[in-house]
Amino acid sequence: MGRKLRFAHLHQHTQYSLLDGAAKLSDLLQWVKETTPEDPALAITDHGNLFGAVEFYKKATEMGIKPILGYEAYVAAESRFDRKRGKGLDGGYFHLTLLAKDFRGYQNLVRLASRAYLEGFYEKPRIDREILKEHAEGLIALSGCLGAEIPQFILQDRLDLAEARLEEYLSIFGDRFFIEIQNHGLPEQRKVNEVLKEFARRYGLGLVATNDGHYVKREDARAHEVLLAIQSKTTLDDPERWRFPCDEFYVKTPEEMRAMLPEAEWGDEPFDNTVEIARLCNVDLPIGDRMVYRIPRFPLPEGRTEAQYLMELTFKGLLKRYPDRITEGFYREVYRLLGRIPPHGDGEALAEGLAQVEREAWEGLAGRLPPLEAVREWTAEAILHRALYELSVIERMGFPGYFLIVQDYINWAKGRGISVGPGRGSAAGSLVAYAVGITNIDPLRFGLLFERFLNPERVSMPDIDTDFSDRERDRVIQYVRERYGEDKVAQIGTFGSLASKAALKDVARVYGIPHKRAEELAKLIPVQFGKPKPLQEAVQVVPELRAEMEKDERVRQVIEVAMRLEGLNRHASVHAAGVVIAAEPLTDLVPLMRDQEGRPVTQYDMGAVEALGLLKMDFLGLRTLTFLDEVKRIVKESRGVELDYDRLPLDDPKTFALLSRGETKGVFQLESGGMMATVRGLKPRRVEDIIALVSLYRPGPMEHIPTYI
């Protein structure tokens, strides 16, 4: 009995090969686990990007599968700066399989994938051999599929050029270059493989078996064919449409791979080398237990720590926010309680001096102040105690720098007349945020809890969302770029996926079903909380949809294929708000691309950026603020009155009468049809009624609104 066949897939596309890869990560990993129960390993090599690297790494690790990070690069025929159309020998690009051997290799993958987008994008994000030489350390290269350089030269019977290119790759990668062997039963592969086998023998190179997987199982081939037609905007009856030549591009079992590369012809080497490469690839991404927060250093005044400077800004801010209680006289009393002599000067000078007092003295004073849980009235002493408590938690959790960065760009914007929202979410519960100008809502007046924002028992990065006028949002982001460095700031990417209705309509078009008929079918899918139900669920709960499947075979096929494609990524775009600010150049850790305006965007989505410990900020462009700017301008021009929204009363009877009539068009969060009806039912008489209404009007609590009213 022969020894057990060992094998690992090293060339696999996922849903992140957009509209080309039909392998969902969860399905892919589950299948690999089933087919390779002992020491499973898998590489992902998506086309020209690293979009899914972190998600794949996390999921594979959780499932006990060794993750190998790679990508199938597009290599320009000559220079990445060339702008010639066509593939391969026509002057466009070739494929090349690259795998990260270690963390340095991962960083070089990131830099290559980034430069491909930032410098070499023309039809595809392309690298060239020049930058491949610069970033080859820590990488393993496989010679590639039929679309790679060496196979293309072989198919053209230009063996001299094929060998010259082989020698060039050997000069770049040395013993980290392997010959990739694929067999999907195609005559072109037979021709190429014979020459590749001879090259390997002559140069002493290892052979590696791969399958260029684009979907998980053979039965997914039809869905993949439809996906390609969605990409190329063609139909199944178009003989010229782009399609794969066979149904062999799935995740084969080791035994199925052996059947394509028989032992008598190939021996065990192409299989053993896959396992050896998997053993060599050991990238430890800094996520999970290894994650550290990577907050940039805020530019500090000389002689201050981040914690001291945040305390100074807080104490100065309290003077402005609570002038009736936090006074110069009160700060002089605090000096006395601390056993210190106050400096000469005004309240701000006193605040600067207090921020230099050592932590132990403050802890001693806090123990003598009224307990926060017993506070019934926010006296100066109670306000100070709350501020000291928040500052101690912020320092203990390592986030003073975070607060300094946020207050800096918010106050920069305010200082230039850019409208900034008063604050949203749990950050409004922070007195420190209120004092330093991050929020404009008094958490003490409204009884808001700091612990909802930062909880020392649950260490996670703070999350402060900030609204800016949508006309001026880009100015604030540009300020942050200039402040911390162009190479350290980018907007965050996101991915649009095929939801059930969209998947059904896309697949119906490919099958030649008229648009009107496809729309009718899509309307049968129920929508809950603004989202269409998954197709599987819709078929179970909508008898009309089942009836359509039973009476029309083509509709049945469309829905079954759409179920397979539902949830796949359709396109990459830019998150509406997310911006990442890094301490080091982003391409040390995160791959970049460009948006339509040429601005840098992360190839990773929000979840991946946060998993790496990077500082993620939400800069929301809010049309309401732009609208309010226009109102202010019109009132000034027509009435000569300078409106100050921060000074408007919150108990104006005429305003509440207007709201009670449901006249809320243009009012942020109160303007939807459902909310208008609810406002009319509640008839708010005070601002607390509106607070309750906005809190209740969301999935789940909505059912309790009638009881509340």
Image: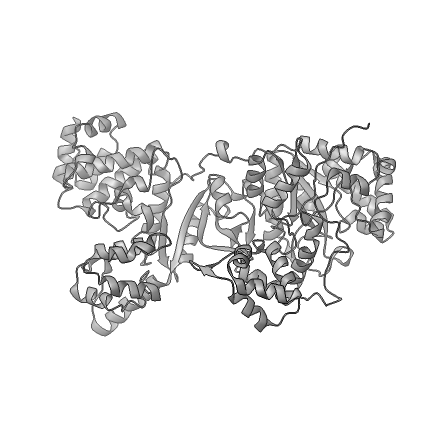
Can residue 111 be seen? yes
Residue 310: name its quadrant: top left
The C terminus lies in quadrant: bottom left
What count of labels does the image hold? 0
Could you say which is closer to the camera, residue 1 or residue 609? Answer: 1
Residue 461: name its quadrant: top left
The way the protein has been coloured in the rendering is one colour
Drawn side of residue 197 relative to residue 703, left or right: right
Q: Residue 584, image x and y in percent?
A: 49, 40
Q: Is residue 329 above or below residue 151?
A: above
Q: Residue 129, image x and y in percent?
A: 71, 46
Residue 572: name its quadrant: bottom right
Drawn side of residue 401 relative to residue 89, left or right: left
Q: Residue 595, image x and y in percent?
A: 53, 57
Residue at 25 percent of width and 72 percent of height: 637
Can residue 350 be seen? no
The N terminus lies in quadrant: top right
Q: Is residue 403 above or below residue 158?
A: above
Residue at 72 percent of width and 43 percent of height: 252
Residue at 33 percent of width and 42 percent of height: 453
Could you say which is closer to the camera, residue 559 or residue 164? Answer: 559
Could you say which is closer to the camera, residue 477 or residue 224? Answer: 224
Could you say which is closer to the camera, residue 568 or residue 120? Answer: 568
Q: Is residue 136 above or below residue 414?
A: above
